[in-house]
Image: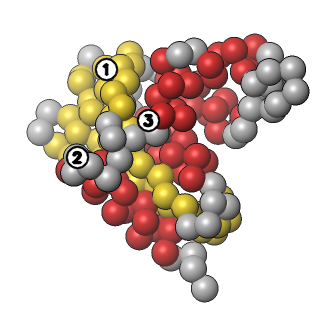
Amino acid sequence: MKKVNLYTDGACSGNPGPGGWGAILECEGRRRELCGGEADTTNNRMELTAVIEGLKALKYPCEVTLISDSKYIIDAITQKWVYKWKANGWMRNKKDKALNPDLWEQLLQELQKHEMCYTWVKGHAGHPENERCDEMAVAESQKFKG
């Protein structure tokens, strides 16, 4: 299996509002940048979309290290919250619905294809790839401003 680093970030102006996402795939000395956006979204939806799109870009199973500044994503997966939400019909508890179940479903499908490791990095702290992903995400979100 090839080893891949997947760096991701999402951005949103207004939350909800115009948003964007950025992802960088690094494998065997090669680098690929991906980005996109939506006119009306949230920051968490863009964070999730960045990971989904990065994983979807892989053509075959890989050993993937996801590097993200999103505690929402990293903690939901590593603490196994997302699996509990799904098992409970996308409820976080007896009263509160889990947010973004459509994207979590897509992400869980993509995660099954790969051997995954997770690394959280502090956002806006000078990590070069995280900064580049943020730059792409913000630029994409700007495309939707009036």
From the image, tell me which residue sits under label 3. 55
Number of the front mark, 1 or 2? 2
Q: Quadrant of residue 27?
A: top left
Number of the front mark, 2 or 3? 2
From the image, tell me which residue sits under label 2. 127
| Residue 44 visible from this viewpoint | yes
90 displayed left or right of 75: right
At x 70%, y 40%, the residue is 100
Q: Quadrant of residue 90?
A: top right
Tell which circle, 2 or 3, labels the residue nearer the N-terminal end: 3
Mark 2 residue element:
loop
Tell which circle, 1 or 3, labels the residue nearer the N-terminal end: 3
At x 35%, y 20%, the residue is 117
Q: CA distance from mark 2 to mark 3?
A: 21 Å
Work out whether residue 41 or residue 116 is closer to the camera in this orientation and state it.
Answer: 41
Q: CA distance from mark 1 to mark 3?
A: 11 Å
Rendered location of residue 99, percent (x, y): 72, 38
Mark 1 residue element:
strand
26 displayed left or right of 133: left
From the image, tell me which residue sits under label 1. 63
